[in-house]
Image (cartoon, rainbow, N blue to C red):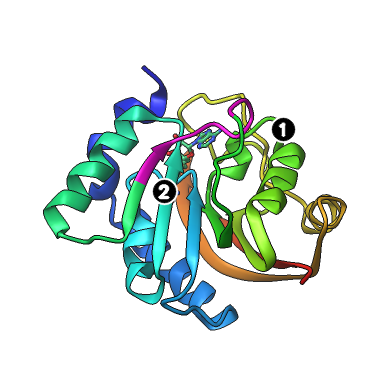
Amino acid sequence: MTNFDERAKDWDSDPMKVIRAKTVAEAIRNAIPLTAKMSALEYGCGTGLLSFVLQSDLGYITLADTSQGMLDVLAEKISASGVDNMTPLRLDLSVDPLPGPTFDLTYSLMTLHHIADAKGILKKFHALLKPGGWLCVSDLDREDGTFHTDGSTDVHLGFARDELQTWVEEAGFSDVKFSTAYEIKKKIDGVEKTFPLFLLIARKAN
Ligand SMILES: C[S@@+](CC[C@H](N)C(=O)[O-])C[C@H]1O[C@@H](n2cnc3c(N)ncnc32)[C@H](O)[C@@H]1O
């Protein structure tokens, strides 16, 4: 059982995570003309907080994660809500073959820093998009290593925007834009610290 499997049941009881997802969803809505004709992939969906906010703006959403615990909670939420345009998928793009369908939009929140080969995943995101498709990634700006208070060491310490832009362009994307989508406030050793989250928007050429 992974750390995320253990945390899945309580994930949604943290109001910060719920507000973070709503705020990032609003930033995505403001940046991209979402339509009910679009098919989307959320990668690293957890319990689906972000996709539940966006589901009425989109046609169909595939929600992928590596944690079965997260996907079980997500499946319960989908069935309780009666929503019929969201499907959970256990998928690790680092090792699994690419799923068959391609998408108009791929988005990801607070997941890229957990992926060792972040550069490689960006190439997979590119391959999974239709021509003209959109990529949205929201994650930590470069931090000093104090963000993960649970002892996780197998993570990127956020990302430098200019370096990430280079990786995204090398993966084949263009029109890369950054904004600051949210700020996580955490007490570290009794002192409140602010961890900004960027929102990267990029496009696959037509
Ligand atoms: C910090 S949580 C964020 C969850 C959700 N996006 C949110 O904002 O509430 C990171 C998520 O990424 C998933 N994850 C970690 N490594 C992954 C990988 N290689 N591929 C897909 N998902 C991964 C974890 O299982 C977890 O659900």
Q: Which residue is mark 2?
A: 63
Query: What is the spatial separation of the Cα atoms under label 1 and label 2, in whole angstroms?
Result: 20 Å
Q: Nearer the viewer, residue 174 or 166?
A: 174
Image quarter of residue 179: bottom right
Please give left or right for residue 172 compared with residue 148 in the image: right
| Residue extending furthest toward the top | 1
Please give left or right for residue 140 compared with residue 40 in the image: right
Boundaries of the magenta span: 88-96
* Secondary structure beneath label 2: strand
- Quadrant where the C terminus sits is bottom right
* Secondary structure beneath label 1: loop
Looking at the image, can residue 88 be seen? yes
Main secondary-structure element of the magenta-colored stretch:
loop
Q: State the image coordinates of residue 184 (x, y, percent, origin top left).
A: 49, 57
| Residue extending furthest toward the left | 80
> Mark 1 or 2, which is nearer the eye?
2
Q: State the image coordinates of residue 60 (x, y, percent, origin top left).
A: 39, 63
Relative to 137, is 119 above or below?
A: above
Image quarter of residue 113: top right
Instruction: Please report whichever mark, 1 or 2, sits nearer to the chain's N-terminal start.
Output: 2
- 93 in the magenta segment: yes
Q: State the image coordinates of residue 177 (x, y, percent, origin top left).
A: 74, 72
Q: Which residue is mark 1?
A: 117
Q: Amino acid at mark 2?
A: Leu
